[in-house]
Amino acid sequence: MAPQLAWIGLGNMGRGMCKNLVEKGNLDKPLILYNRTKSRADDLSAKLGRDKTKVVDSINDAAKSADIIFICLGDDAAVNSAVDVILEQDVKGKLIVDASTVHPDTTNALEKRLTAKGAEFVGMPVFGAPAMADAGSLICVLAGPSSSISKVQPYTKGVMGRADILYADQPSGTSTLLKIIGNTFILNMVEVLSEGHVLAEKTGLGPQNLHTWIEAMFPGPYAAYSARMLAGDYYKREEPLFHVDLARKDARHALDLAAKTGSSVPALQVAERHLGKVKERLGGRGDIPSIYGAVREESGLGFENGG
């Protein structure tokens, strides 16, 4: 008999991951859904099927009858708060899987707290945009005891993701250490694209000519972010795909790791400064590619490119 699964946190990524759990996870019990804003859970349940999902009113309700509890929340404080509630009950024999992007120190501390109470824990952040979550093509990074990871893998590659990166029998924080460092690649990529497009515009090459080269030379994420910039998506979008607050949180975590280890990360420092300008300019509508607008303003151009 398959285990009972519960999911806590239904942001852009969580909704897509739940969709694939229901559609491809071979569940023989309804997936338990909890979100702080209950309407989001109700809407997802209606979409996936009331017979295939069960919406609950509290984290306690989600955890009490679940064998495997997935958490996918926005920041360290939210994850710690959720675990506080989970630990109000007997968790012996339960497996908690954290798919959130948090500081590796947070992940390692969660592992200690939960295993001390008899639970199992796996750190499982994922790489990919919301569209990839919806398509089931995420990259899942799993760290923790191999026996616990094996219980999670039936729901990763081929269900929620297209590939697994495994750190079996390594500290669970190894997964979020990779995630935080990996996200600096995304930030730096967007910074480089932004600077390149501004330079192309001001020198007369033109952003479209540069984009043609990017498509040929760097198909994939580079070309996709470049297209969003030129289309003006970076300031037109009402709901960001990678919220500026989450990007700034990831940057702070990476800068903290760099400071603690004496690592030089000047490119990341520039990108983090530009994210601050994005927050000032767009508030909650700010997205990672909005860095383009900040670089444009610093270069004497308008924040909006008229795309």
Image (cartoon, rainbow, N blue to C red):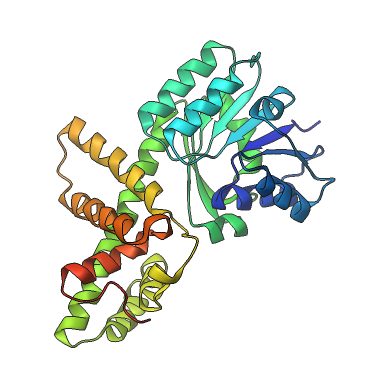
User: In this rendering, is residue 107 above or below 203?
Assistant: above
User: In this rendering, is residue 307 above or below 185?
Assistant: below
Quadrant where the C terminus sits is bottom left
The residue at 19%/54% (across/down) is 270
Residue 5: percent from the left, percent from the top? Answer: 70, 34
Quadrant where the N terminus sits is top right
The residue positioned farthest toward the right in the image shown: 51
The residue at 53%/52% (across/down) is 138
Residue 297: percent from the left, percent from the top? Answer: 21, 70
The residue at 21%/80% (across/down) is 200
Q: Horizontally, is 49 left or right of 61 in the view?
A: right
- Tally the marks: 0
Q: Horizontally, is 272 left or right of 37 in the view?
A: left
Q: Quadrant of residue 147?
A: top right
Residue 196: percent from the left, percent from the top? Answer: 22, 73
Does residue 33 show up?
yes
Q: Horizontally, is 259 left or right of 23 in the view?
A: left
Residue 95: percent from the left, percent from the top? Answer: 62, 25
Does residue 144 show up?
no
Q: Horizontally, is 163 left or right of 254 in the view?
A: right
User: In this rendering, is residue 73 above or below 136?
Assistant: above
Q: Quadrant of residue 68?
A: top right
Q: Nearer the viewer, residue 140 or 194?
A: 194
Q: Nearer the viewer, residue 123 or 246?
A: 246
